Structure formats: C-alpha cells, structure tokens
Amino acid sequence: MRALIQRVAHAEVVVDGASTGKIGPGLLILVCAMQGDDAATGAKLAAKIAKLRIFQNEDGKMNCSVMDIGGSALVVSQFTLAADTSRGNRPGFSRAAPPVEGKALYESFAADLADLGIQVETGIFGADMKVSLLNDGPVTIWIDTQDPA
C-alpha cells in the first residue's frame, strides 16, 4: 500500500456538495492499495501511521503520535498514488489494485485505524471528491509498504 500522510489543523472531504468526512487536528491520509497487497499489509500500515511521532510535544519537538494528541484521521482513497510516470507524460495506473479489491483494502485499512482508538472519517471510494485541508507545519510523509528501504 502507498500512503501520503499530512499533519493537519483540519481537513474535510466533500462529495456532490455534501461533507462525508471532517476532522480537526490530526492526519489526512491519502491511501492506495497496490497489486499484491492484502489485509495484513493494511493492518501493518495502520499501526505504523498510528504510532508515527510527527506531532510536537511541549518542547516543540516532533515526538508525539496522533494517538498521543487525541487526534483524528481523515482517510481518502487515492488510486493515483500508484502512478507510473517512467514513460511519456501520461501516468499509468496498472499497479493499483483492481477496484473491488482496492475498495475492500481501503475500508479494512480505515477500520484498522479505528480499532487502534483513532477517530476515523472517510471519503467515498471511487467518488469525485473535493478535499480541503490546512497542512500543519507543513508535515507530509510518504510510506510505500512495497519499498524495500
């Protein structure tokens, strides 16, 4: 799975003019299931993100997790994170999981975060979403579970 995590003061996703998810301080997580991913991959990613120490402590050091600050997570499906830009100018998305599988993994990932005690809001898989946020820091982290590093 691939995730782009942004520390936010607030974030919201709107579909067809209606808010489907809105959070205060916490994380906006854009997530993409890739071919070969499974529920265990999503569970490991959720645990990693929940424990990421990217919020400031009382000394101004990034040493607290979203759980430590009682923050929320807005999870938005983002198949374009699978973009292959190695050839030409039009990205390819063939490495993304097929839609039915991707949706199940996206929902499972969001549920795993919630099971860790984080308040989770979501977008709608496959919808045309409008996402707004106030990036805090800014702090933006990229995680690719298939990256050997």
Image (tube, rainbow, N blue to C red):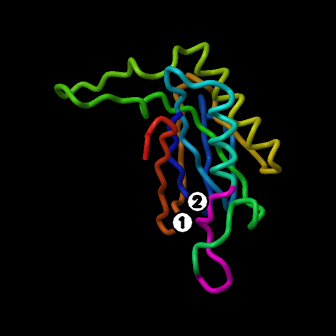
Question: Above or below — where is 50 with respect to 63?
Answer: above
Along the line of sight, the residue nearer the viewer: 128 or 1: 1
Q: Position of residue 15 (x, y in %)?
A: 60, 31
- Type of amino acid under label 2: Val
| Residue underneath mark 1 | 136
Q: Position of residue 94 (x, y in %)?
A: 39, 17
Along the line of sight, the residue nearer the viewer: 134 or 67: 67
Q: Which residues are magenta?
A: 51-60
The quarter of the picture where residue 51 lies is bottom right
Q: Is residue 123 left or right of residue 83?
A: right
| Crowding near the residue tagged with mark 1, few <14, some 14–19, many ≥20 C-alpha atoms within 10 Å | some
Task: Based on the picture, tell me whether residue 59 belongs to the magenta stretch.
Answer: yes
Q: Is residue 137 visible?
A: yes
Q: Say whether disc 2 or disc 1 marks the residue closer to the N-terminus.
A: 2
Question: Above or below — where is 58 with respect to 35?
Answer: below
CB under 8 Å between callouts 2 and 1?
A: yes
Question: Above or below — where is 33 with respect to 136?
Answer: above
Question: Above or below — where is 62 with respect to 84?
Answer: below
| Residue underneath mark 2 | 8
Task: Say which element carries label 1.
Answer: strand
Task: Say which element carries label 2.
Answer: strand
Q: Position of residue 19 (x, y in %)?
A: 67, 39
Q: What separation in Å lies between label 2 and label 1 (alpha carbons)? A: 5 Å
* Residue in view at x 58 percent, y 21 percent: 102
Q: Is residue 102 left or right of residue 72?
A: left
Along the line of sight, the residue nearer the viewer: 119 or 132: 119
